[in-house]
Amino acid sequence: MGTLSVLAAAAGAWIFGAIWYGVAGKPWMAAAGLTEETINRKNYAAFIGSFLCAILVAGMMRHVFVTSGIDTVGKGVMTGFGLGLFVATPWIATNYMFAQRPLALTLIDGVYATVGCTVMGIVLVLL
């Protein structure tokens, strides 16, 4: 597990995000208070920034995996899933509760965090 695995894991989660928000795009926009008229689809900084954030998450997950001896697909799936569901999603939920955002937004973004971390976990143990 090295730089290549971190970049591949980040790319895997980022690609999943593109698919997920393609499917959940309309409900996500509604929950986020956006419309086709107000969303900026040319906000390239958000796309680049989200990939950089995915690299940070994958890098820390790699560190956790190496120091914890997580080296099988089963362990990678369970740890990635656990980090997404029990670390990332509660942080999202906490922020959204204080921001008075709809539960639907928490659920949509929580699924992305959970599945994205699971994808990262799989890629990290395979490479």
Image (cartoon, grey):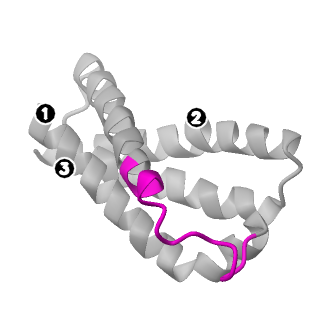
Q: Which kind of residue does numbered mark 1 sit on?
A: Thr
The residue located at (49%, 79%) in the rendering is 22
Which callout, 3 or 2, points to the residue nearer the camera? 3
| Circle number at residue 99 | none
Distance of label 3 from label 2 (alpha carbons):
22 Å
- The secondary structure making up most of the magenta span is loop
Q: Is residue 67 visible?
A: yes
| Circle number at residue 3 | 1
Q: Position of residue 26 (x, y in %)?
A: 65, 82
Q: Nearer the viewer, residue 109 or 121?
A: 109
Q: Position of residue 36 (x, y in %)?
A: 66, 83
Q: Which kind of residue does numbered mark 2 sit on?
A: Val
Q: Which residues are magenta?
A: 34-48
The residue pinned by badge 3 equals 8
Q: Position of residue 122 (x, y in %)?
A: 26, 50
The residue located at (37%, 44%) in the rendering is 54
Q: Quadrant of the N terminus?
A: top left
Distance of label 1 from label 3 (alpha carbons):
9 Å
Residues packed near mark 2 inside 10 Å, few (<14), some (14 to 19) or many (20 plus):
few
Q: Vertically, is 32 above or below 45? A: below
Answer whether residue 123 is magenta in the image. Answer: no
Q: Secondary structure at mark 3?
A: helix
- Looking at the image, is mark 1 or mark 3 earlier in the sequence? 1
Q: Which kind of residue does numbered mark 3 sit on?
A: Ala
Q: Nearer the viewer, residue 119 or 4?
A: 4
The residue pinned by badge 2 equals 87
Q: Secondary structure at mark 2?
A: helix
Which callout, 2 or 1, points to the residue nearer the camera? 1
